[in-house]
Image (tube, coloured by chain):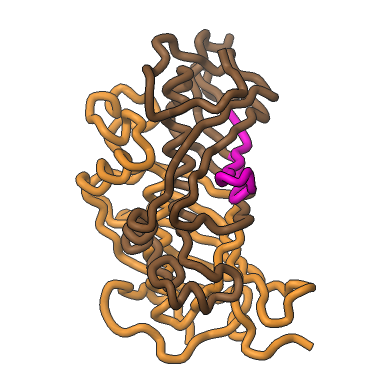
Chain colours: A orange, B brown
Amino acid sequence: MIEPVKLDVFSGAVASEPLYLEDLSPGQKLSFGDYHVTREEIIDFASRYDPQPFHLDDAAAAANPLLGKLCASGMHTMSMSHLLQMRGFAKVGINPLAGAGMDELRLYRPVFPGDTIHSEIEITQTREIRSKADRGLLDYLTTVLNQHGEKVMTYRSTLFMARRSPRN
Amino acid sequence: MIEPVKLDVFSGAVASEPLYLEDLSPGQKLSFGDYHVTREEIIDFASRYDPQPFHLDDAAAAANPLLGKLCASGMHTMSMSHLLQMRGFAKVGINPLAGAGMDELRLYRPVFPGDTIHSEIEITQTREIRSKADRGLLDYLTTVLNQHGEKVMTYRSTLFMARRSPRN
């Protein structure tokens, strides 16, 4: 049901049968792609939510000792990865109830105009919630990679997921 | 230089004198506001980056046991808070070199159309980087609040900041 093959999240149907918390277990992997990152979208996102000069202006980016070139906001990279995941989840039948949190986000290298990124996840844990019989928590680790297979970002996410059968 | 007063980040000038890592220390607080959240922007962001039904459709949101009403993507709330911070940082003279990471993001309650949010930060630590004499790391805790003073989100961020004087 879950295969470690990169799914094209922008074509094909979504799953007709939903998955529940009981269907998911540590070690299961999914890979979602591809997102082509344009200069226009980098500047559009940065203008709205992260107007730091190195996301908007070539000369400012060239002067930056860490970045060197106009690059996407980390918030933008996370958002693009999130789109890949949410579309990918719908394709395999994972329909989260809501987000609960994120941990250990790390930025390894910039995402540049013209890059193509994809997002890989590995389920690390499923958890019960003491006070809720109808839902639990799904923990997974995300790795975002560019077209060279280089790691650009990792983070851990926690989502609320419905249980198929309420816990006794 | 740094005051625990809510700055209006959308008016007035940016700082003419930059702050460096040496100017920042644990316990310093900043408050940045206000961001008015519209239904149009919630749906626009969700369509681009988080197309889960409860961010796009009233009936789907009403059926959700945790949310109950159409609400902003957590990624969107983080992005709006980030805009407040980056504009606020520019106003006080904090010019990060780049982002390094985020930790312990927690979602406490949804952000709904018509809400007005603001973002408060407290510096928790400044750190040296062994191999880099010209920069260090700034750690701070963010709390995002709505117009009722209710906590909607918290997270910790780490940014690269330039030093005024290279470390010996």
Measuring 28% from the left and 25% from the top, which residue is drawn there?
Answer: A60
Q: Is residue B5 magenta?
A: no
- A60 vs B73, left or right, is left
The image quadrant of residue B21 is: top right
Q: Range of the magenta residues?
A: B138-156
Please say if A29 is above or below A118.
below
Residue B103 is at least partly visible in this image = no
In percent of the image, x 48 and y 21: which residue is there?
B94
Q: Is residue A40 above or below residue A161?
A: above
Q: Position of residue A69 (x, y in %)?
A: 28, 33
Q: Is residue B147 magenta?
A: yes
Total numbered circles: 0
- Residue A96: % across, % down: 53, 73
Q: Position of residue A2 (x, y in %)?
A: 48, 82
Q: Which residue occupies 58% across, 70% down? A: A123
Answer above or below: position of A138 versus A47: below
Q: Vertical placement of B164 versus A131: above or below?
A: above
Image quarter where the C terminus of chain A lies is bottom right
Horizontal relation, residue B44 to residue B131: left or right = left
Residue A41 appears anywhere in the view: yes
Q: Main secondary structure of the magenta part?
A: strand
| Relative image position of residue A64 (x, y in whole percent) | 35, 25
Q: Residue at coordinates 73% horizontally, 81% vertically from top-left?
A: A133
Asked if residue B47 lies left or right of residue A142, the reply is left
Q: Nearer the viewer, residue A125 or B123?
A: B123
